[in-house]
Amino acid sequence: MATTQAKTKKDRTYFHVTFTSWALAVLGLVWAVTFNISTYRAGLFEARDYQKEKSREVEIQVQSYSSIATQLAAALQVFVERYQGGDKKQIEQYLDYFLESAPRYFIYGIGIWWEPFAFDPQLKHFGPYAYRKDPQSSRIITYEWSTPDYDYHKKFWYQSGIAIDEKTIVTSPYREQDVAYISLLKPFYDLKTGQKKGVISVDIVVPQIQDILRNLKTKPSDTIIVVAKSGHIIGHSRPTELLAQAKRLHPEQAIDSILDVRLADAMAGLENMLIQSTPMHSVGWTLVMISHPDEVLVGYHRIQRVIVLATLVYLLILALGYFTIRHFQQSLQRQRESALYTEKMASLGEMAGSIAHEINNPLAIVQGAAQTLQIRLRREELNREELKHTAALILKTADRIGRIIRSLRYVVRDGNLDPFVNTNIRVIVDETLGLCESKLKNENIYLDASPVPVDLCCVCRGVQISQVLINLINNSIDAIRELPEKWIRLEAYVEGAWIRIAVTDSGPGIPKDLAEKIMKPFFTTKSVGHGTGLGLSISRGIAQAHGGDLEVDLQCPHTRFVLTLPQAHENLQSA
């Protein structure tokens, strides 16, 4: 408890430097993390923009092809609804013309599928269909509709087309006769009655979707998937890898093309990738783009390396700065302690003559008493009362010498490494005055020392507090040496939670403009060669290191310094 209450200035400075260093380190790390997060977000936004841009390129091409199919279906609708004849060959001829005008690389085939008996009351089925097996082959008119086994009215695609009104729909991929189809369907009407007469179909070539994806300029690890409403895959930028993966996942199933693969299977193992889904409203499909973070965030990773390097350099510089400051602090502390010891030795040096005189006088008394005893013994004139008196004189004088030596040993010791202990202020004052009394007598200065309460205690380094008092008394001696009235008063008292030790002399006081200056290092009012200007500065530093202060009392008509120390809350057990 005592040690906690007595925080030294050195400890506070060390705490401030350490706290500041840690605070700067934390701020640096917070900046690094914040900047890293913001950079990552910016990189993520950039990656998303890249994915959106590529998705938009695919969507534009698909919309372009979809628009061609839609326009072709609309042209067929106008033709069929305005056609008034009943010649099947003529219908087939016009159908062939329409297919010839359609782009070979995208349109697989077109068909006009009438409702039962709608074209000819005697003919239930009539659904001419023209197609190309591949973009380079000739057009073929099929007559599947005329076979008994092919009832197109029951096909899901026909039922989907006949169920809609005016608009067009695009089917999910399906197979017929070992051919994969994606059909754009549009109903046509009887202009007189407004009744539906059938469905127009425009079939899209599925491999053309693959060509769009294959020709798109993307990053090496990018994967682009076109998905139908049913979840089946229409296009994939890595079809070979997709089929191999699907067969591994479902070895019991027959998987011949990407149309047999569901999106869930294509997404297996891609949980850590950047995924962008874009709906293509014109055809009802969804475009999924998958990118590897290391490729699309390559700019972020470069900046991240710079951030890590900059943070490490910052922390290294901070660590070097911290240890440099600590080194200088320790160096300054050693210089301060050296200056304190030098100042203490200088103070003791000023008292050396008086101390020597104070010791020599008692020694002369002891020597004289011993010689008297020797003479009396030789003459056999020694009586009991005289021997008793001489022995008492020698003991008293030896005690006086011992007290001076004890005080000198107490003060001269280096107390910088002493622990803070609960110390009696009376002990400190007595030991200090024991060294100063002889000098005060030699200077004819009257000392008025008020009795110090026995229970007045402070958690301190007693040697350092004694040094402060010696310095104040020496300053007073130097200041009033030439004055006609010479006296010094020392008193200790309690004021609240503080102990005040006041040293007052008969001097006229210190001007207000000098009151703060005299506490600064190297400032002195003494003549050259009679002062270093470190005494009061060091004394104040000691007081502040003990959690107190040393101040000039400007309200006093005489020169008065007040040393303030925190009072101990524990009972003294002698220190």
Image (cartoon, helix red, strand yellow):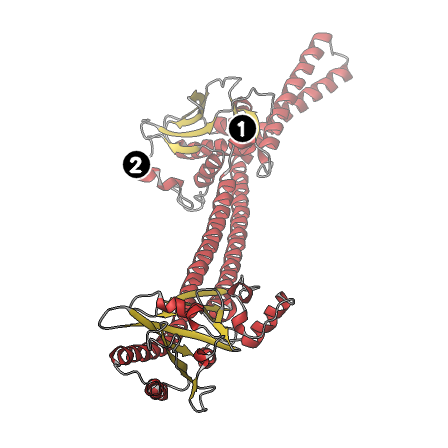
Could you tell me which residue is drawn at 50 percent across and 56 percent down? Answer: 318
Q: Secondary structure at mark 2?
A: helix
Percent from the top left, x then y, of residue 109?
Answer: 41, 82
Q: Secondary structure at mark 1?
A: strand
Q: Quadrant of the image for the N terminus?
A: top right
Dot 2: within a 10 Å radius of its alpha carbon, few (fewer than 14), some, or many (20 or more) residues? few
Relative to 536, does residue 130 appear above or below in the rendering? below
The total number of labels drawn is: 2
> Does 516 sit left or right of 302 as displayed?
left
Assess whether mark 1 and mark 2 are in contact (beta carbons under 8 angstroms). Answer: no
Vertical position of residue 242 compared to residue 341: above or below: below
Q: Amino acid at mark 1?
A: Val
Quadrant of the rendered structure where residue 166 is? bottom left
User: Residue 459 bears which disc, if any?
Assistant: 1
Residue 340 picture location, percent across and down: 52, 41
| Label 1 packing within 10 angstroms: few (<14), some (14-19), many (20+) | many
Provide the residue designation for mark 2. 512
Q: Residue at x 45, y 72 (%)?
A: 151
Quarter of the image for residue 105 reads bottom left
Task: List x then y, in percent, for residue 361.
Answer: 60, 26
Residue 57's disc is: none
